[in-house]
Image: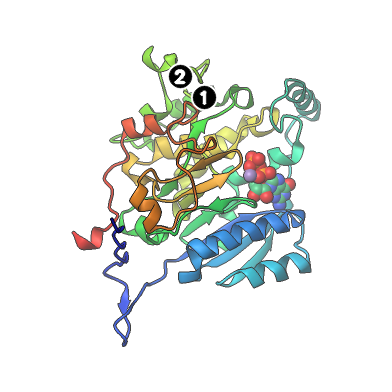
Amino acid sequence: LKPLKLSTNTYDDDVLSAGNSIIPTKENATLLMLVRNFELSGALKSMRSLEDRFNRDYHYDWVFLNDLPFTQEFMEATTAMASGNTHYALIPSEDWDRPNWIDEQLFEDRLELLRDRGVLYGGSKSYRNMCRFNSGYFFRQKILDSYDYYFRVEPDVEYFCDFPYDPFKLMRHNKKKYGFVISLYEYEDTITTLWDTVEEYLDTFPDDVAMVNNSYNFITDSGIIGKFSPIIDSNTDYNLCHFWSNFEIGDLNFFRSDRYKRFFDFLDSKGGFHYERWGDAPVHSIAVSLLLNRDEIIHFDELGYFHAPFSTCPTSYYLRLQQRCQCDAQAASNIDISPNSCLMRWWKNGDGKRFLKDNQT
Ligand code: GDP
Ligand code: MN
């Protein structure tokens, strides 16, 4: 049996060249990496992988953000690795540093508490700045003003398969606003009061929520049934499910909207990014689950991906051959249908229709 050759994923706005080959049009999008200078080798590894698997055919720009100035060495090496243009920006301190209304003593006490409890990054100040930045400020950076979509990339990740489509184009054509590959449970100790705050937000801004078809059911287990999971032990209706944000492809105009900013500002006003250790993953996930219709969220299940300690790999044997995947669907790190994964809950919630080849319908 020979695997079928995957038909080229083209769209009606792609252009036909004189030689009859199809030239894909580019979206108004960028690959985006928040990164530190000392992570250069990991940054190059991720870039090489994404360039090989996707961007070498498209040449999308890369944007790099940092709370400290990038070194010449960092900029030269990443520019050499990129097939598109590269841009570098310094994050203003007011978008990164701890706000001055955070109570110093309470902050130090809470750091110690979470550190002593052995919570991952529980004692880290910079990690908190990073999570708050990724929740409420990345999309406000001037350097992103001219783009509509971003694809978040982290150092030391790997993309296992050739992309069978341009995810930006797929998102625009199908009106998707947020895309993920892995979904799992959050550590409850990092977000002790997050859900109570979200409920307060819901009472305060009920009109902001997507009423028709949101994903509230995906992130909550108010009934008894959901509480049987061996993994979750949540003290609230939030079942701790979130999209892993080290991979995300999103619509910047959604994050730049007043609705999203009201959501972030409400959360931020409670100080939980610093007094606790609220992550940008649960914050983004709760926001898109409540504010978007569920078919505006897409699970990219054709894209193999690894960020320690978890991976995802297409289940279909032929798909793995067609996309030259270098991953083992049986690997111990594959989270897709393990008890740590929230994917089964997502399937139950439903992610709308798939439109992989909408040009052919
Ligand atoms: P983890 O994936 O949750 O274990 O956290 P990472 O250490 O990978 O950090 C998440 C992302 O934020 C990565 O892209 C890091 O490069 C970046 N990052 C984390 N802390 C800082 C920081 O203090 N400054 C900058 N510029 N980037 C950071
Ligand atoms: Mn990471």
Secondary structure beneath disc 2? loop
Q: In which quarter of the image is the N terminus?
A: bottom left
Image coordinates of residue 109 in percent, x first then y, are: 79, 23
Quick one: which residue is furthest to the bottom in this view?
Answer: 18
Image coordinates of residue 117 in percent, x first then y, are: 73, 20
Tell me: 291 left or right of 311.
left
| The image quarter in which residue 22 lies | bottom left
Tell me: 15 left or right of 59.
left
Where 220 sits versus 291, above or below?
above
The residue that label 1 is drawn on is 195
As rendered, which of 250 and 205 lies closer to the eye? 250
Where 73 sits versus 285, above or below?
below
Residue drawn where x is 50% and y is 66% of the image: 55
Secondary structure beneath disc 1? helix
Say whether residue 160 is visible. Answer: yes
Marks 2,1: beta carbons within 8 A: yes
